[in-house]
Structure formats: structure tokens, C-alpha cells
Image (cartoon, rainbow, N blue to C red):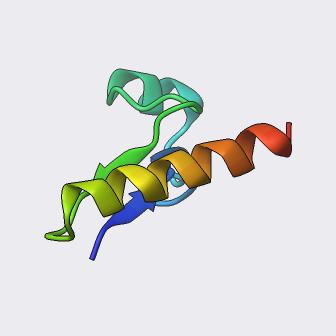
């Protein structure tokens, strides 16, 4: 199973913005943990998610 995570608001939320910057985490950072699904399925899912995010801007 694949997972997308926003570290600035999840795993690193206890850190200040400066501490996050030092750790290499920015508000734009998205961490992808890719599972063993077929690569075409992963790409299609990412395309769909990015299109949905763009429509909410």
C-alpha cells in the first residue's frame, strides 16, 4: 500500500518552522512511501490526486 504524507503538519508538527527548515522540511514537502502496486496504478493515483489538488486551489 502506498501513502502520501505532509510532514510539516504530521511527523514534524512539534518543531518550529526554523527547526523544520533545518531538517529539510518545507510547507510544500510531500513524502511518498510507495508500496508494491503496479507502477501504472501508482502513477494514475498520483495524477488523479494532483488534478484534484489543483482544482481546489
1 vs 26, left or right, is left
State the image quarter where residue 17 is shown: top right
Q: Is residue 6 above or below residue 36?
A: above
- Which quadrant: the N terminus? bottom left
**Left or right: 27 as drawn, with respect to 3:** right
Asked whether residue 12 appears in the rendered view, the answer is no
Please give the name of the residue rendered at 21% of the width and 55% of the height, measured from the top-left corner: 39
Residue at the farthest front position: 40
Provide residue 37's location: percent of width, then percent of height.
Answer: 21, 70
Please tell me how many numbered marks the rendered image carries. 0
Q: At 28% from the left edge and 55% from the top edge, which residue is drawn?
A: 40
- The vertical placement of 18 against 39, above or below, is above
Q: Which residue in the rendered view is the most extreme toward the bottom?
A: 1
Nearest to the observer: residue 13 or residue 3: 3
- Name the one closer to the observer, 20 or 49: 49
In percent of the image, x 85 and y 36: which residue is there?
57
| Residue 22 can be seen, yes or no | yes
Residue appearing at x 55%, y 37% in the figure: 16
In the rendered view, does 23 fall on the left or right side of 26?
left
Residue 25 appears at what percent x and percent y? 42, 32
Q: Is residue 2 above or below residue 40?
A: below
Seen in the picture, residue 27 relative to 44 is either above or below; the reply is above
Amino acid at each position: 500500500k502506498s501513502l502520501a504524507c505532509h510532514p510539516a503538519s504530521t511527523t514534524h508538527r512539534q518543531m518550529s518552522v526554523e527547526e523544520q527548515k533545518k531538517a529539510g522540511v518545507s510547507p510544500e514537502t510531500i513524502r511518498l512511501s510507495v508500496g508494491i502496486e503496479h507502477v501504472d496504478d501508482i502513477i494514475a493515483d498520483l495524477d488523479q490526486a494532483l488534478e484534484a489538488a489543483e482544482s481546489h486551489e
